[in-house]
Image (cartoon, coloured by chain):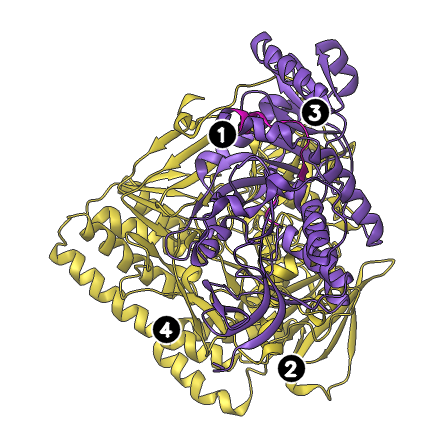
């Protein structure tokens, strides 16, 4: 162990899609950046790659008190999806980005009315949404099974392959001099001299600027500095089948049950959408659950019977940051040099776009959005 | 031979006479069809592992795709088609309701044994003798595992079962007489930290919440990553042996058997006796070197019958004029107009030896084994590195208990030891599991237990001597080319993996995410152990228990529709 802490200019804690994008934007703006991450270099690759725009029924059911904040910020989502495309183009790479449109399906009149009400609100808020009855669905999404009564289509939704996106972001950053330090878990942050001391199990760092981009992990990091960020970790379960020929054209969700369902260009069908996982007792490794395998995948074949004969080849778990209604992006004004970076709900979708907004603040560029509501100053203990 | 022993099946519109009880893979090999599937990239694939692990022999049967030819038994007329990657073969339009985990039938056996090979059978027998209720699950259609694999076809023209077959049959019959419950063609595809297991078969899916579980899932052949190792006609030694010992089918007329260890010797002898032309038996080590004499003596003292058997194999092969080569390894295989051409080179310590080439129909690769410990790892069992064998082993107490309460592991899945060690391990763990449930051991049990311990010690001495005799420097990627397939399933090349390592990937998981290596249907069983060694060598360390992938269920693929059925209801 080195006694003298390693000096860093800008330390981003967390190498997920937000942290890695931010590192790239800051490096492109001339900053010297180090991404310190407690994981094994996985970034946001446990994510299933859905790009969400329409209000997710799961959020509406679980967090009714956050809906108004979510609606106020709904305009960010189409911009965030478009930004993914922009990023793919700017990086000259292929994330397997496709703006396929997303369908939220209903199985009965009651669920359809829920979607009707939801789509009216979303339409007023500027989203490109449309209700489709069974007959119209036959043309748009013939793969949906007979249980589906109707659906809401949001043309602005889509998907990327998180594996490709992660690799591209990392290569991009590395090419501009960003250092990625995996397997380096930051336990606490303390003010130290004119900067901040980061404690990790095997080495110490002294950073001039610290950006908290650790998802649910931001909770403990912020607390060590005296702030109370409203984030928490939510382990979620995902499934993937063996590949099949092109079948599912959209990102598919359900009006009343947790699921996301889509097909990568490799042919694999990815099934997720909010089924629980847990942190393994001995080492807090995100681990899958049998109940989620059974429930999630049999629900998927209920919606799309054609996938019933496909075999599951893998399941895995990742950690989502729970719902809080809007991004938290900016400097703690009582502690200059420390920034919060929480991308908001459907954080993967908002990741690169949120990173851009925060990078603009840090680099002193003009802001493209009103960020008053995103200020971390609201969360002082 | 009665006609009831045969059944006509169809393969791509052509009629094939199959033997009742053999597998689809075996019937097609017998009829000369080697290409069973085309990969995502259009490459031809055929039977490789022959034991349900590699997922390379997938075919479409009666309109259902993704079925393993090597694991599908023929008991009636069927229509088989070569699988084209990803093709959906049937229309599924029925919206069956979703179910919850509570809807899946639960069984609570006192003792669950997973795997009916030597270790599993002897564990089941001992556990049942102690008084406990025992349920055994196995993926194959009959008992015996890879060592005792049974003859599944009948007819007077086929060579009868030999002693090894009969020993397995006897062990199975003892279990049946003791009222051990068996469930075959049943794949245990998941294990969880709460010691729950889940299994599926044609009838459906069952959750198992046993009071004790004995994992006896055996081993599978280690990958030998060389140019051409994915070609149809290239298969593992075990695959060719299953074709012969179970179905009395020759993998081909001309065969090169190559690898390390006595299984290759046995296969070459069996195929020669069965009428094949063994072009060469290629051993990577030099077991007849002078220094081996001490170990041969040790083998004689510890288990002379196997030593005598081995010497008998060599005599028969020599008498048949088989080319017996030591110190050589397969460095590449290419397809020719009439079959395969295999290139041999001196093994790592003998690189000065000249390159040899042989024309053949089939190449069997048998370069050692990897333990099938996926289920044990999924429930949280810890492993340790064995520096002598250069491999990970499950950490066991002296009765086979793992680091997870009430979970035992026996046989090769716990760390390679061979069938004879597995038998003793199984017996010891079986009695221990029974005793831990409160069944007292009688004097008879105790004397059997004492015998098992002594036999195990003796067989371990034999095994250690055998390993020393067959010692050779492990081959990883020395003979691979950049374009050689490293990961068979996802068709990831050696070159792309090496460049990912050069670009700073720090873990096998990162290589997986970067290159897709190990993301396919076999779950990285072949590529990952090699990758682990490559990465350890580069880092100047040894493989450790965290250097592989995190265990992921399903450990074997399971169809979503199989989750909808409950075994007892249909």
The answer for how far apart the CA atoms under marks 1 and 4 are is 46 Å
Among the 4 quarters of the image, the one containing residue B19? top right
Above or below: residue A259 compared with residue B140: above
Magenta stretch contains residue A50: yes
**Which chain's residue wears label 2?**
B
Tell if the residue under mark 3 belongs to the same chain as the one under mark 4: yes
Mark 2 secondary-structure assignment? loop
Q: Which residue is mark 4?
A: B460
Image coordinates of residue A125 in percent, x first then y, are: 70, 23
Image coordinates of residue B494 in percent, x first then y, are: 73, 65
Give the residue drawn at x 50%, y 76%. Answer: B311
Q: Which residue is mark 3?
A: B90
Identify the magenta region: A45-60
Above or below: residue A288 compared with residue A302: below
Among the 4 quarters of the image, the one containing residue A134? top right
The answer for how far apart the CA atoms under marks 1 and 3 are is 24 Å
Question: 10 Å neighbourhood of mark 1: few (<14), some, or many (≥20)?
Answer: many
């Amino acid at each position: 162990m080195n006694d003298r802490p390693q000096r860093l200019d800008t330390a981003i804690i967390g190498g997920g899609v937000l942290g890695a994008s931010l590192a790239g934007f800051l490096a492109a703006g001339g900053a010297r950046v180090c991404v310190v991450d407690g994981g094994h270099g996985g970034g946001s690759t446990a994510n299933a790659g859905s790009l969400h725009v329409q209000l997710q029924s799961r959020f509406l059911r679980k967090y009714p008190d956050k809906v108004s904040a979510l609606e106020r910020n709904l305009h960010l989502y189409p911009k965030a999806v478009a930004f993914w495309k922009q990023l793919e183009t700017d990086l000259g790479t292929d994330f397997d980005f496709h703006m396929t449109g997303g369908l939220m399906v209903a199985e009965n009149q009651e669920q359809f009315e829920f979607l009707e009400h939801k789509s009216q609100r979303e339409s007023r808020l500027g989203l490109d949404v449309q209700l489709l009855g069974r007959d119209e669905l036959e043309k748009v999404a013939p793969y949906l099974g007979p249980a589906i009564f109707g659906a809401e289509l949001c043309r602005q939704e889509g998907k990327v392959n998180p594996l490709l996106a992660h690799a591209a972001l990392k290569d991009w950053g590395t090419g501009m001099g960003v250092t990625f330090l995996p397997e380096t878990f930051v336990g606490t942050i303390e003010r130290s001299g004119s900067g901040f001391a980061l404690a990790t199990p095997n080495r110490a760092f002294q950073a001039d600027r610290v950006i908290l981009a650790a998802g649910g992990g931001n909770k403990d990091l912020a607390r060590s500095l005296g702030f109370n960020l409203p984030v928490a970790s939510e382990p979620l379960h995902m499934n993937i089948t063996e590949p099949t020929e092109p079948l599912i054209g959209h990102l598919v969700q359900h009006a009343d049950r947790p699921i996301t369902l889509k097909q990568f260009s490799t042919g694999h069908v990815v099934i997720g959408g909010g089924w629980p996982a847990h942190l393994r007792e001995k080492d807090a490794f995100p681990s899958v659950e049998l109940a989620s395998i059974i429930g999630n995948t049999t629900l998927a074949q209920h919606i799309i019977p054609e996938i019933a004969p496909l075999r599951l080849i893998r399941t895995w778990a990742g950690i989502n940051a729970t719902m809080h209604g809007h991004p938290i992006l900016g400097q703690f004004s009582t502690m200059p040099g420390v920034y919060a970076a929480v991308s908001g709900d459907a954080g993967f979708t908002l990741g690169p776009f949120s990173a851009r907004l925060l990078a603009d603040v840090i680099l002193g560029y003009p802001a493209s959005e009103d960020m008053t509501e995103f200020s971390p100053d609201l969360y002082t203990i | 031979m009665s006609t009831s022993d045969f059944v006509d099946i169809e393969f791509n519109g052509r009629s094939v006479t199959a033997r009742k009880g053999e597998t689809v893979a075996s019937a097609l090999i017998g009829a000369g069809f080697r290409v069973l599937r085309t990969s995502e990239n259009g490459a031809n694939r055929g039977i490789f592992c022959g034991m349900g692990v590699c997922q390379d022999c997938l075919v479409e049967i009666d309109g259902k795709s993704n079925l393993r030819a090597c694991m599908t038994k023929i008991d009636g007329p069927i229509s088989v088609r070569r699988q084209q990657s990803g093709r959906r073969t049937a229309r599924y339009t029925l919206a069956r309701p979703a179910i919850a985990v509570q809807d899946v039938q639960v069984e609570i056996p006192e003792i669950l044994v997973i795997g009916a090979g030597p270790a599993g059978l002897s564990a089941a027998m001992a556990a049942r003798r102690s008084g406990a209720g025992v349920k055994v699950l196995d993926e194959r259609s009959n008992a015996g595992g890879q060592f005792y694999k049974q003859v599944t076809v009948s007819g007077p023209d086929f060579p009868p079962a030999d002693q090894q077959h009969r020993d397995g049959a006897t062990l199975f019959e003892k279990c049946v007489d003791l009222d051990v419950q068996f469930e075959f063609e049943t794949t245990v595809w998941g294990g969880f930290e709460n010691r729950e297991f889940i299994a599926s078969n044609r009838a459906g899916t069952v959750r198992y919440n046993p009071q004790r579980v004995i994992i006896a899932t055996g081993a599978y052949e280690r990958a030998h990553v060389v140019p051409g190792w994915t070609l149809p006609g290239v298969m593992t030694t075990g695959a060719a042996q299953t074709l012969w010992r179970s179905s009395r089918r020759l993998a081909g007329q001309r065969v090169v058997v190559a690898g390390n260890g006595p299984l290759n010797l046995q296969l070459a002898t069996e195929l020669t006796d069965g009428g094949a032309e063994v072009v060469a038996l290629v051993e990577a080590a030099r077991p007849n070197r002078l220094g081996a004499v001490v170990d041969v003596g040790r083998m004689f003292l510890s288990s002379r019958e196997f030593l005598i058997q081995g010497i008998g194999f060599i005599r028969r092969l020599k008498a048949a004029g088989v080319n017996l080569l030591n110190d050589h390894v397969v460095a590449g295989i290419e397809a020719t107009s009439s079959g395969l051409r295999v290139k041999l080179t001196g093994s790592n310590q003998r690189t000065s030896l000249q390159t040899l080439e042989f024309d053949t129909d089939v190449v069997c690769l048998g370069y050692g084994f990897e333990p099938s410990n996926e289920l044990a790892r999924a429930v949280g069992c810890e492993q340790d590195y064995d520096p002598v064998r250069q491999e990970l082993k499950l950490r066991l107490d002296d009765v086979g208990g793992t680091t997870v309460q009430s979970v035992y592991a026996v046989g090769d899945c716990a760390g390679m030891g061979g069938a004879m060690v597995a038998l003793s391990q199984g017996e010891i763990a079986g009695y221990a599991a029974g005793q831990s449930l409160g069944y007292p051991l009688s004097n008879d049990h105790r004397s059997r237990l004492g015998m098992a311990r002594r036999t195990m010690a003796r067989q371990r001495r034999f095994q250690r001597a055998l390993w020393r005799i067959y010692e050779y420097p492990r081959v990883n990627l020395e003979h691979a080319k950049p374009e050689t397939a490293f990961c068979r399933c996802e068709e990831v090349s050696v070159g792309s993996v090496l460049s990912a390592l050069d670009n700073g990937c720090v873990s096998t998981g990162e290589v997986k995410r970067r290159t897709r290596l190990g993301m396919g249907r076999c779950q990285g069983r072949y590529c990952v152990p090699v990758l682990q060694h490559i990465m350890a060598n580069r880092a100047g360390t040894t493989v450790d228990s965290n250097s592989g992938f995190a265990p992921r269920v399903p450990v074997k693929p399971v169809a979503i529709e199989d989750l909808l059925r409950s075994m007892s209801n249909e």
